[in-house]
Amino acid sequence: MKKNMFLVFIIMFFCLLISYANADCTKTEINLLKKDAEKIRVFYKHLGAIDSGDEFIVYDRFDITFKNVDDDFYIEENSLAYKNSPKNGVITDTFVTGTWNFNIVSTKCNTKIHSIKVVLPKFNVYSLDPLCEDIDGDDFVLCSKYYSGNVSYDYFKNKVLEYKSAYKRNSEEIDNENSSYKYNISYYLKNMYDFIIKNGIYFSFGFAFIVIAIVVLVIHIKRSKRGVLK
């Protein structure tokens, strides 16, 4: 009997502890913490070529930075058993290309407050190939800095050569159109000039006639005004 009472007492004691712990974080407090967690901003920076230590260069390293992290929070990533606390509201660590799901956890409540998903793009090694020189990655995805697909080098090479051939044809067509346009303008201007030169005397008489007509019209208007004033 005493043994059973002791077990009941122990159970009640733990229940009281749990109840007391939960009392430290009310629903209202957790909602406030969530608002603070939503202020966290995430940035990532590609670190470029990194020597892995065994004479092998990798391009899949990024620094992820969390800013505005409250001192009450820490950040964890379950797949890595990763856990880190902020210093002056900032956490920065290095991760590889991929999708990472971070939890924002309150040390006071010992519960997850918020979650943040970060997708680090896959660096495209082919973008360093000489074939991609002078090619805009925004126009041709196989030469872009980041590309998630997997293609063989032969496929990449063939597509680049096709792109360059098509681009060259388009450039030549545009140049031909511009040349044709410039030629047409020059042709019309030359014909107009030749026409004016050949018919210069008629243009001279025409110009003189217009000047005389304007002078006569001005004189007539002035005389009409004088007649009104009289």
Image (spheres, rainbow, N blue to C red):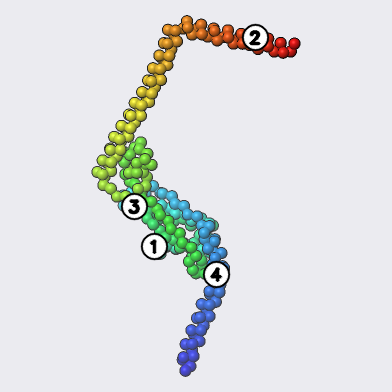
* Whole-number angstrom distance, CA of label 3 to CA of label 4: 49 Å
Q: Pointer 1: what residue?
A: 80
- Residue found at x 36% / y 26%: 177
**Amino acid on which disc 3 is placed:** Gly
Whether residue 61 appears in this view of the structure is: no
Distance between the alpha carbons at the discs numbered 3 and 1: 22 Å
Assess disc 1: are there few (<14), some (14-19) or many (≥20) residues with their C-alpha within 10 Å of its C-alpha: few
How packed mark 4 is, by other alpha carbons closer than 10 Å (few <14, some 14-19, many 20 or more), is few
Q: Which residue does the numbered mark 3 point to in the structure image?
A: 53
**Which numbered disc, 1 or 4, marks the residue that appears first in the sequence?**
4
Which residue does the image show at 40% across and 64% down from the upper left? 78
Q: Amino acid at mark 1?
A: Leu
How many C-alpha atoms fall within 10 Å of the one at disc 3: few (<14), some, or many (≥20)?
few
Q: Residues within 10 Å of mark 2 (few under 14, many from 20)?
A: few
Q: Which residue matches tag 2?
A: 219
- Give the foreground label among 3 and 4: 4
Local SS, label 2: helix
- Image-quadrant location for residue 64: bottom left
Give the percent coordinates (x, y) of residue 224. Answer: 68, 11
The circle drawn on residue 27 is 4
Q: N-terminal of the two: label 3 or label 1?
A: 3
**Distance in Å between CA atoms under marks 3 and 2:** 98 Å
Q: Secondary structure at mark 1?
A: helix
Vertically, is 100 above or below 216?
below
